[in-house]
Amino acid sequence: MALTARQVTLITNSFRKVEPISLQAAEIFYDTLFSYDPTLKPLFKGDMKQQGRKLMAILHAAVSSLNAPEQLLPVLQQLAKRHEGYGVKKAHFTPVGNALLHTLKVGLGDDFTRETRDAWVELIHFVADTMKAEMAA
């Protein structure tokens, strides 16, 4: 992952602002995701509040590992295999990334600057590329 020190700071600081509203942010994320691609909704069979907690936990892990991405690699690789078993395809990463960016924009408001957005895009690409490399389709 080729994040600059400035990008690490932007991601870390912005995520700290989102964490206190994590349940609301997760709800925004899934509402947005399903509006972008309604065909994804059947992939989620469990309690959506629990799913939101899982989402925020993996985001927390990613943000916490920004200075040591090699620690995140095995987590993402394992996550990719599990998600593949749920029916997730490589093509699903685009609406997921877009829904996350929208969620951050809503959650952060004016604090979601272009520079902060660009930093998150780098992280999202790292996560998506790592996971997609483990998936067949």
Image (tube, rainbow, N blue to C red):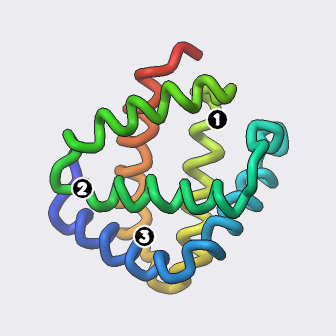
What residue type is disc 3 on?
A: Arg
Residue in view at x 59 percent, y 41 percent: 94
- Secondary structure category for the residue under label 1: helix
In the rendered view of the protein, which quadrant contains the C terminus? top right
Is 89 rendered above or below residue 62? above
- Spatial separation of the CA atoms under disc 3 and disc 1: 24 Å
Q: How far, Cα to Cα, is label 1 from label 2?
A: 24 Å
Along the line of sight, which residue is nearer the eye, 58 or 29? Answer: 58
Label 1 belongs to which residue? 92
Would you name the residue on which mark 2 appears?
Answer: 66
Quick one: label 1, few (<14), some, or many (20+) residues within 10 Å?
some
Q: Is residue 71 left or right of residue 24?
A: left
Say what secondary structure mark 3 lies in.
Answer: helix
Picture coordinates of residue 67 (x, y %)?
Answer: 17, 55
- Three-letter residue code for mark 2: Leu
Q: Amino acid at mark 1?
A: His
Q: Residues within 10 Å of mark 3 (few under 14, many from 20)?
A: few
Q: CA distance from mark 2 to mark 3?
A: 19 Å
Q: Residues within 10 Å of mark 2 (few under 14, many from 20)?
A: many
Name the spot of residue 63 as percent of width and height, x first.
33, 60
Return the disc, 2 or 3, that comes first in the chain's sequence.
Answer: 2
Q: Earlier in the sequence, mark 3 or mark 1?
A: 1
Report which residue position mark 3 lands on. 114
The quarter of the picture where residue 73 lies is: top left
> Quarter holding the N terminus?
top left
Q: Nearer the viewer, residue 60 or 131?
A: 60
Q: Percent x, y for residue 110? A: 50, 85
Do tag 3 and tag 1 residues touch (Cβ < 8 Å)?
no
